[in-house]
Image: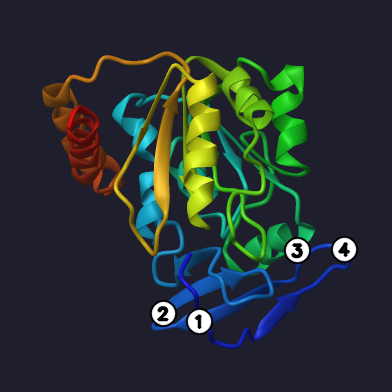
Amino acid sequence: MPDNSSSPDLRFSQPGHPPATVTEFEGVRSLHLGTSWEQGAMRLSRPDAIELEYVQMMMAWLLFQDAPQHIVQLGLGSAALTKFCYRRFPDARVTAIELNPNVIAICRALFELPPNDARLQVREMNALDFVLDKRNHGTVDALQVDLYDQDARGPVLDSVAFYQGCCDCLRPDGIMTANVFGEFGNYDKNLAAMTEVFDAVVWLPEVHDANIVVIAFKNAPQLDFSELYERTGAIKRRLNLPAKKWVEGLKEWMRDQHE
């Protein structure tokens, strides 16, 4: 979420929520919530691709799951993850939870978010309500969490109760990826809360102006790096995502833990 000081030229500003605005630079359209902080981006020539590196890293669950049946995104952003999962996993249901109606409206108008259908549901609601709803428990294979307000000081939901709800939503082999960005104290607070709840928590190296992507497992997997490297080739060929860098990041994390 870099600070981009360009003046927004379009507004979606339903009262009661931060306005959604856009800027464009060198063929990339960026989403803002009425401030200079970038909340997501789309390359106009490749609207269904994932433009930002940290957002690509939110797909790191692919190293451990290749056929998800239900993918959930908490925080729509510029809809990059939602569109990508909807287009590239035709056998999966995709659900996106977004509190701000201005974000949903701008994504449909300017970021090519498809309308809801039998596989895609974009719901205007609080992510905490979603994860605490027992009807959602045990239904999710991949949960992607990127929850920021207009100030981007840290995740807007970061309690143990929230992350317990996230864990409860996962199936036994389910995985959560979460972006932890903001003021320094937020890193430790979020990691401590996740570690209290999940069986295993790892994180990838910082990218894109201090974004750190955390991978949390409901049940810890065996990390076989030769197998993971094999999977990176398939992910690169099928989805054009830099999965080899994710595995290298996991190896770096393991080395750091043992030093």
Where is residue 5? Give x, y as percent. 53, 84
Residue 141, above or below 236: above
Q: CA distance from mark 2 to mark 4?
A: 31 Å
Residue at position x 68%, y 66% in the image: 106
Q: CA distance from mark 4 to mark 1?
A: 26 Å
Q: Residues within 10 Å of mark 4 (few under 14, many from 20)?
A: few
Q: Which residue is mark 1?
A: 24
Nearer to us in this view, 231 or 148: 148
Residue at position x 23%, y 41% in the image: 249
Numbered disc 3: secondary structure: helix
Q: Earlier in the sequence, mark 3 or mark 2?
A: 2
Residue 240, above or below 107: above
168 on left or right of 83: right
Where is residue 169? Give x, y as percent. 62, 21
Q: CA distance from mark 3 to mark 2?
A: 23 Å
Q: Kindly indicate the quadrant of the structure image that contains residue 232.
A: top left
Question: Which-is-in-front pick, marks 3 and 4?
Answer: 4
20 on left or right of 175: right
Q: Which residue is mark 2?
A: 27
Q: Earlier in the sequence, mark 2 or mark 4?
A: 4
Q: Which residue is mark 4?
A: 16
Q: Residues within 10 Å of mark 2 (few under 14, many from 20)?
A: few
Q: CA distance from mark 3 to mark 4?
A: 10 Å
Numbered disc 2: secondary structure: loop
Question: Which-is-in-front pick, marks 4 and 1?
Answer: 4
Where is residue 182? Give x, y as percent. 52, 57
Type of the residue with mark 2? Gly
Residue at position x 42%, y 38% in the image: 214
Q: Residues within 10 Å of mark 3 (few under 14, many from 20)?
A: many
